Image (cartoon, grey):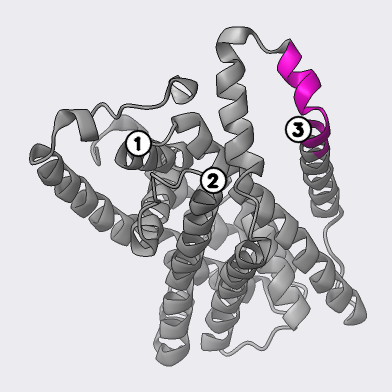
Amino acid sequence: SIRSPSYLFFLSVAVAFLYFVVVRFDIEPAYIWSSLKESNPLHLSMAFILHYTTYFFRGVRWHVLLDNVEQSDRRPPGILHCSSLILISAFINGITAFHIGDPYRGILIAKKTGRGLIQTLGTLIAERIVDISVMVILLVLALILMLAEGINAPNYFLTLTLLISSTLGLFLIAIWTLKTKLLSFVPKLLQSVFINFYRGTLGSLTRMHLVILFGTLAWLSEISRLYFVSSAMGFSLNVGLITFAALSNAFLTILPLAGLGFAELGIAELLSQSVSKGDAGLIIILDRAISYLSVIIIGAVVFVGYTFFTANRNADQSPDIIDAPKLPASENL
């Protein structure tokens, strides 16, 4: 609910963060307004459109991941359906902590298709694995371009990148090579849960050319958004710096509270190596207006519309199909 204490708390934190950026980088409100009036509307429109193409590309990728899990009698929803659920999860992540929007969309898909919830949640882990893998590769390329231009990356971020990447690698090695041994430590009552999670995670990682292609397109849209935001304000930034800053922001959102904008402070410091601190803060505020504020507004509309449509459709369906899907014994939780 919009009036709920949790929503008001996280919204107030987000507003406080934007205020902190304005104060920290000494940005005059008059300067913000004059810069917006002088900005390039075409480039701002491109930044807005590119941001929402990311949800389409991620929707295609999630559709492929769901389809990869071998359940021919339970086809995944369409691409637009998957894309709308990803936008809804981004909206929920934006007003809450701990990324609860991600499991929420997994629950919605499991309920709609009759798939096992654990297996569906496994596809979300696979999605995150692909995201981080592609992100790390692009970050390395961006870092090389930055160093060639004499721009230094923050040591804390390089350390965090190495830590998260190593953790991901160890997780994959453990679950891939030690499946049988790990299963022996799982109580028999939970073994079917483990197997379904395993199938959902690694079983969805086939047709990797499509999974990686649409994952990469999503990240390129994120990078292009920041490029057009800075370009709209009249700044020409190094390609490596733009790429590193955009992906760093996304990479830091893996942390539970980063969706509120804490990551942007470090990104603004990074951009200030090429522009003034005030201009760096201005770029971040405008970029956040597109990637956060607009998602809260548009995501809320999509969420209400989806909830209303689903409620009406469920009223016309048999409760056995919609509210209580009958799952195979191996997938009951």
Residue type at mark 2: give it.
Val
Q: Is residue 197 left or right of residue 276?
A: left
Name the residue beneath numbered marker 1: 114
Name the residue beneath numbered marker 2: 69
Sequence-first disc among 1 and 3: 1
Sequence-first disc among 2 and 1: 2
- State whether residue 12 appears in this view: no
Q: Report x, y in % for residue 28.
A: 50, 71
- Quadrant (top left/top right/bottom left/bottom right) for the N terminus: top left
The image shows residue 223, relative to residue 97, as above or below, that is below
Q: Is residue 122 left or right of residue 56?
A: right
Residue 132 disc label: none
Q: Nearer the viewer, residue 239 or 204?
A: 204
Q: Alpha-carbon distance for marks 3 and 2?
A: 17 Å
- State whether residue 273 appears in this view: yes
Residue 271, located in which quarter of the rendered image? bottom right
Instruction: Please give the name of the residue rendered at 13% of the width and 46% of the height, measured from the top-left corner.
Output: 313
Q: Report x, y in % for residue 96.
A: 43, 39
Q: What residue span does the magenta drawing correspond to? A: 173-184
Sequence-first disc among 3 and 2: 2
Q: Alpha-carbon distance for marks 1 and 3?
A: 26 Å
Q: Residues within 10 Å of mark 2 (few under 14, many from 20)?
A: many
Name the residue beneath numbered marker 3: 175
Q: Nearer the viewer, residue 159 or 26?
A: 159
